Image (cartoon, grey):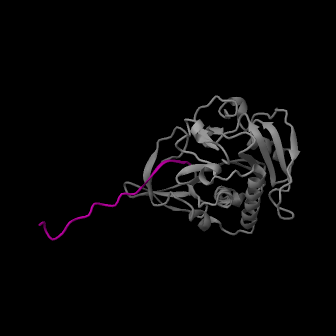
Amino acid sequence: MGETPHCERSHCMPGDRPENRPDAPHTMNQKSRNLHLQLPAKPVIGASVTLYDLVDSTNDLALQQLEQGAPGGLVVVADRQTAGRGRFSREWISAPGEDVMMTVGLRPPSDLVERLSPMAGLAMALTVDEIAGVRSTIKWPNDVRVDGLKIAGVLIETRVIGDETLAVIGIGVNLVLDPSQWPEIAKTATSVFAVSGRRVKRDSALAVLVRRLDELYRRLLARDSLTAEWADRLDTIGNRVELTPAPGGEPIKGMAIDVTDGGALVVQLDDGTERVFNAGEVTSQKPAQSPPQTLTGGTK
């Protein structure tokens, strides 16, 4: 999965058109079939896994199904999307029918909503490690990377109806995508095949990912914190960062020094004050420069 600000190719996802917003009616005619993944008995996530040939957006479809009364834990998978989107409404680039394009639909307790992002990031990182045989890291909040290149990402959207929160977790994992064919992401993205030489089948990757999500969500429901495990993967902490809190907003510069239990990033600004960011995008992160050493004892 790669994200680019502008793209007009047939399997790119123009998510910024008005008719493709999450509140737009879902009218695409889909062909679908159930996927039977090797999952534990009675999973909380994955009891229903449906593959669609073509959808506008897996997030939009999963949200629509929740609004129509579908139980939480459903999984929507697509061969192709016409209006998939990444964070900040960026285009979403994937290899149709081969890369993972999926959404989990949940009805989470309201106190767990902010913890879904770390959960999803950790599940993706564990999945990449397992299927690619590498050690992945996470750029805050949930871009999974290998050697500094993005290999998986997530977009979480919520909607409150009455006293209930509906949440959809859109996930993309690059299994075979060749970023070199896309100038917009050639220097920022990678794939499982590129880093490992392994051609992992999508259903195999889905089975691992859904299993990891189910395991971690069960722990959240038991009020088990995942923060320490997620934070251990972060490659953002200890770096100087430039962070954009919202699309079009002024970037904030400082040192990423910590995360909260809910996954917010704590940044120390250059004036010494600290700010906590619950959302945003780290557009740049660089190792902190050591202060210049002061020589003592005179010169020779």
Residue drawn 81% across the image and 55% down it: 73
Q: Is residue 39 at least partly visible in the picture?
A: yes
In the image, residue 241 lies at what x, y percent? 45, 52
Q: Which residues are magenta?
A: 280-300
* Residue 75 higher or lower than 224, as above or below: above
Quarter of the view holding residue 298: bottom left
Residue at the outermost left position: 300
Q: Which is nearer the eye, 49 or 11?
A: 11
In the image, residue 170 lies at what x, y percent? 71, 47
Quarter of the view holding residue 126: bottom right
Query: From the viewer's perspective, is 210 left or right of 153?
Result: right
Residue drawn 74% across the image and 69% down it: 222
Residue drawn 82% across the image and 45% down it: 51
Q: Main secondary structure of the magenta part?
A: loop
In the image, residue 121 lies at what x, y percent? 64, 56
* Residue 93 higher or lower than 144, as above or below: above
* Residue 92 higher or lower than 175, as above or below: above
Residue drawn 69% across the image and 56% down it: 113
Residue at the outermost front position: 197
In the image, residue 167 lies at what x, y percent? 74, 50
| Residue 283 among magenta residues | yes
